[in-house]
Amino acid sequence: MTTIASNLQAMRAAIHEAAHAAGREDTNITLLAVSKNFPAEAVRSAYHAGQHFFAENYLQEALDKMSALHDLPLEWHFIGPIQSNKTRAIAENFPWVHSVDRLKVAERLSAQRPEHLPALQVCLQVNISDEDTKSGVSIAEAPLVAAQIARLPRLKLRGLMAVPAPTDDIHTQRGAFATLRELLQNLNQQGLQLDTLSMGMSQDFAAAIMEGATMIRIGTAIFGNRTYS
Ligand SMILES: *Cc1c(COP(=O)(O)O)cnc(C)c1O
């Protein structure tokens, strides 16, 4: 078995265990393999180990991998920062975008989503740790921006995404994820119909699953440590 295959197997077991501890079904938790900084061949190897959903942070890197892997039926999710001049290529090439963090970007994605494709599925990124350096709307802004995005014709607002401040303390991790879950519940009480909580990475996915994550985004625990050149 390749390292990637055994890492995936261990990851699926860990998801199952966390879901069981939370009294949840692991079928309600989608594992996204975050392949940034890893080559197309690593993605191919994950696919052969049963992984279908992949996430990328950088547009050009993602497009290169998509073309190298066009023979495989993969589903690609965009999770990186979005510059306005990149929205067209994102709208044309991805079925899902998790990192929508302002109305202007959502409007461009909606306007640029090709007619022959289904509505682009998006999450609103929320800055739950309220760090200046992190992208995402504030918790206070989220209800208005979510309502505005939900009205855009070529987008389907599915839910919320967050990248909380890293910490090893599981209680702090759970607190941040609980904040996102409660925000989603509030938005649904106000009439939105959101079903997706995109939260949890290699270091904190168990806490995220305890708090209701429906999509976890895992890079390091599947592909290994990233080296930046
Ligand atoms: C890189 C990245 C991940 C994966 O992080 P790991 O700690 O390697 O699992 C998940 N989400 C986002 C937004 C990322 O940028």
Image (cartoon, helix red, strand yellow):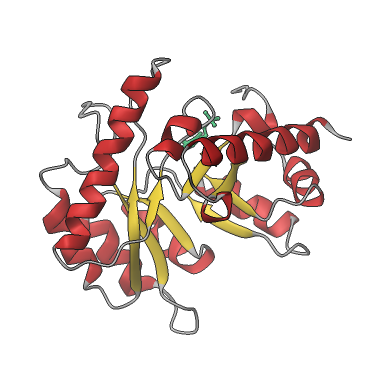
Q: Is residue 19 above or below residue 167?
A: below
Say which quadrant the N terminus sits in: top right
Q: Quadrant of the C terminus?
A: top right
What is the total number of numbered labels drawn onto the structure image?
0
Q: Position of residue 106 (x, y in %)?
A: 28, 61
- Residue 84 location (% of width, % of height): 32, 54
The x, y position of residue 105, in whole percent, is 28, 57
Between 189 and 146, which is closer to the camera in this rendering?
Answer: 189
Against 167, residue 190 (above or below) is below
Is 135 drawn above or below residue 204 in the view shown? below
Q: Tell me which residue sits at (34%, 21%) in the image.
A: 171
Name the residue furthest top: 168
Please tell me which residue lies in front, 66 or 189.
189
- Toward the right, the furthest residue is 1
- Whether residue 186 is visible here, answered yes or no, is yes
In percent of width and height, residue 224 lies at 68, 26
Asked whether, in this view, residue 177 is left or right of residue 140, the answer is: right
Decide if residue 146 is in sight here.
no
* Image point (49%, 47%), residue name: 24
Choose between 81 and 26: the one closer to the eye: 26
Name the side, left or right, on which 210 lies relative to 171: right
